[in-house]
Amino acid sequence: MPDHEAEYRIGNGFDSHCLVEGRKLILGGVTIPFEKGLEGHSDADALLHAVCDAILGALAMGDIGRHFPDTDEKWKGCDSAVFMRESMRLAAERGYCVSNVDATILAQRPKMAPYIDVMRERIAALLGVLPGCVGLKAKTMEGMGFVGRGEGIAIMAVVMMKRNSAMKSSPI
């Protein structure tokens, strides 16, 4: 079987953004009450960005910056759910769908625990999977580095893609 028709593909993604005054904090499609938000060209949803990177990586299609460059005014202020839907469209076009995703939010503040379940549900809806297929957890950095100093938030994500059984071949 050619490697482009692999039954499963794994991708990993990473994103980080600085925390700044005057922006909403949006993670996983959820607005989280906080005095700062993430700086970025779009809505700066680093969680959705990392998941998109993982999907695109699993498909060997580069990263989010290649598909949605911050040099394109079309993406200014854009809801990152648009990036997720487009990444899923590219996956479906190539005969793949998401099996599951696991992500870790690295943030000293605010506490993420109250928002984890609603973020999981939002991500699951965007991916077309059950919430039980979305693993999400948050960690502090115990005061270390830019995250620990409260200067930003970072996200790590891994996605498992599976071949859609209805597809017989892939253009990859």
Image: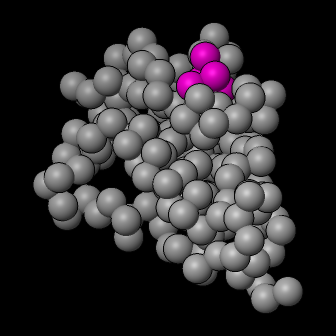
Relative horizontal placement of residue 160, taking residue 148 as reference (left or right): right
Q: Residue at x 18, y 61 (%)?
A: 72
Residue 66 at x, y = what percent? 38, 70
Q: Give the color scheme: rainbow, by chain, secondary structure or one colour.
A: one colour
Q: Residue most toward the left?
A: 73
Q: Residue most toward the bottom?
A: 2
* Residue 68 visible to the viewer: yes
Residue 52 painted magenta? no
Q: Nearer the viewer, residue 94 or 21?
A: 94
Quadrant location of the N terminus in the rendered image:
bottom right
Residue 79 at x, y = what percent? 33, 36
Residue 120 painted magenta? yes
Q: Residue at x 68, y 53 (%)?
A: 97
* Residue 147 visible to the viewer: no
Picture quadrant of residue 130 = top right
Relative horizontal placement of residue 69, taking residue 123 as reference (left or right): left
Vertically, is 46 above or below 136? below
Magenta stretch, residue numbers: 118-122
Relative horizontal placement of residue 94, taking residue 136 as reference (left or right): left
Residue 101 at x, y = what percent? 73, 44
Q: Residue at x 77, y 44 (%)?
A: 100
